Amino acid sequence: MQKRPPIIVVMGHVDHGKTTLLDYIRKTSIASREAGGITQAIGAYEIVYKEEKITFIDTPGHEAFSNMRAYGARVADLAILVVAADDGVKPQTKEALQAILDAKIPFVVAVNKIDKNNADIEHTKQDLFAAGVALEGEGGNVSWQQISAKTGEGVNNLLDLILLATEMEELTFDPSAPASGVILTSRLDPRRGMTTGVIVKDGTLTRGAAIATHHAKGKIKFLEDSTGKTVDSLVPSAPALIVGFEDMPQVGEPFLAGTEAQVTLFFTSKKERTAPSGVPEEENAIRLIVKADEMASLEALKLTIENLKLPASPRFIDTGVGNITETDVKLAGSTSALLVGFKTKIDKAAENLAKSQHTIVIDSPVIYELGKKIQEYAKKLIPKEVRRIEVLATFGEAKGKERVVGGRVVLGPIKNQEHFEVWQNEKQIGEGKIMNLQSGRKDVQLAETNQEVGLLVQTNDPIKAGCFLLFSDPE
C-alpha cells in the first residue's frame, strides 16, 4: 500500500466564494467566466502545496445542484465548508453541511470574505453554532480558518490545516489493484465522442484498459490528466478525463477499470436498467424535451424542473446530452413538447425546422433563468376547463379548405358545426369549423369527453397530429 493525496471537496452556499477560493489556490480565473457567476458543473483540480499533492473538487452552490454536492461529498476525504462572513449561514450552507454529515467525512470551516467592510465574524460563528457546528475555541472541535479568497489572506493557513487533518486519515491505495473511483462529469463531445471526468481512488488507471460503471462500459482510448496532458496512466487521487465509454455513465456512480474479466460483473445490462415504470402519464402533464452540455448539468436541470411550482406535473419525453438537433425538434413537434436547452447550441437546420413547425425552444446558460422561462411557458398552457379535441391523425390529402382528421375529445361536449381554434405548442396557428362529426363511423351531433371522433373540417391552416382544436363556450 502506498500513501495517496487527499481529495478535498469545497462546499457551501451560492456566492460565498468557493470557486474564488480555488481560483486563488490554482492562480486561475474560472469564477469570472462562470455564466451567471455560478459554477454549474463539478470540476476537479490537482495542486502541489509544500511538495504535497492535493486534489480539489469544486461543487456548485446553487440549490439546484444538491444532488451533485452529495456526489462530491461521497468521493472526498475531507470537506471545506465555506461560509461568507458578511452573509452567515444560509439554506445551502445547511444543505451542504447535511451532505457532509451523511457522507461521514471530516470537515473544516473557512470563514470567507473577511476583507468586506460588513464582515461580522462573531455573528457568523454564532450562526454556525446554531446550525450545530461548534468551532475550536468556541466550545467545539471543528477546525476553522478566517480567509479572504479575494486577497489570499489566511489561504495558506487553510491549506496547512487541510494537510494536518488529512494526515490523520492515513490515506493509502494499492497500485496493483484494478483502478476504481467515481464519475464526476459526462458529456458528448462532437469531435471525440463520450468524454467522462473521473477521480481515481484506488489502483492505477491505464490507457487501453476496459472500464465500466453499473450503467455504461467501454475501453479507455484516451486518458488526460487535470491539466489536459495526454498520459498513459494515473494513480490516486488524480482527476482524469477519459474518452472511450460506449454509453453515458451517470454522474456520481463508481467505476472499475482493468481487464474485461474484472469489469464484466460491474456492468448491469441496459435491458435491466430501462424497465418501464408503469406510472401513467398525467392527463395535463407539461411535456418537455431537455438537452444539456453534460450529464451533471442534465440531472441538475431535471431536478430544478421537478421542483418548480407548475400548474401540472412535468413529463420528460426525452433527455440527452449535446446540441439540439432536427431529431429533437421533430420529436417535440410530434409530441407537442417544449424544447429546453441548458448550455447547449441549436443546429441551424433544427432552428429552421423549429420556426417552420412552430416549436418553442428555450435555452440559457443559467439554470434559474431556465426555470423562470419554463414557469412563464406553463402559465400560457391551455386551461384545463377549455373544451378541446386532441388531433391524433390526419387522413388523405386536403381538398381545398376541407380535410379529414381523427382525434379524442379531451374535454367536451363538442357539437357538430362548431367553430374552433387550431393550437400547436401552446400557440394559436389557425382556425376553422367542423363540417361533419362522426363517432364509430356514424354521424353524430354531439361528442362527449374521452370519445374518439372523426371530423371533416374546413380551415385554411395546417392541422396535424399533436395539434389541439379549442372550442370557446357560447356567450
Image (cartoon, helix red, strand yellow):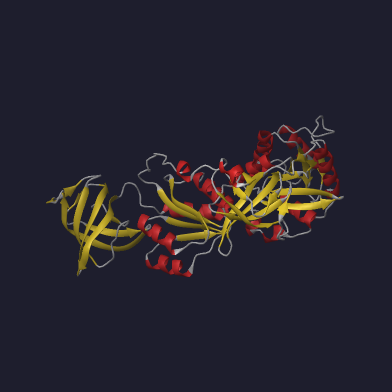
Q: Position of residue 420 (x, y in %)?
A: 25, 58
| Foreground residue among 329 and 240 | 240
* Quadrant containing the N terminus in the rendered view: top right
Query: Residue pushed farthest left?
Result: 442
Q: Image check: 12 left or right of 386?
A: right
Total of numbered circles in the picture?
A: 0
Q: Image check: 243 left or right of 466?
A: right
Q: Position of residue 219 (x, y in %)?
A: 60, 53
Q: Position of residue 214 (x, y in %)?
A: 56, 43
Can residue 186 be seen from the camera position used here? yes
| Foreground residue among 7 and 440 | 7
Q: Image check: 399 left or right of 422?
A: left
Residue at 39%, 52% in the rendered image: 381
Q: Is residue 104 above or below residue 320?
A: above
Q: Position of residue 152 (x, y in %)?
A: 83, 53
Q: Image check: 22 left or right of 293?
A: right
Can residue 16 be seen from the camera position used here? no
| Foreground residue among 470 and 286 | 286
Residue at 72%, 51% in the rendered image: 234
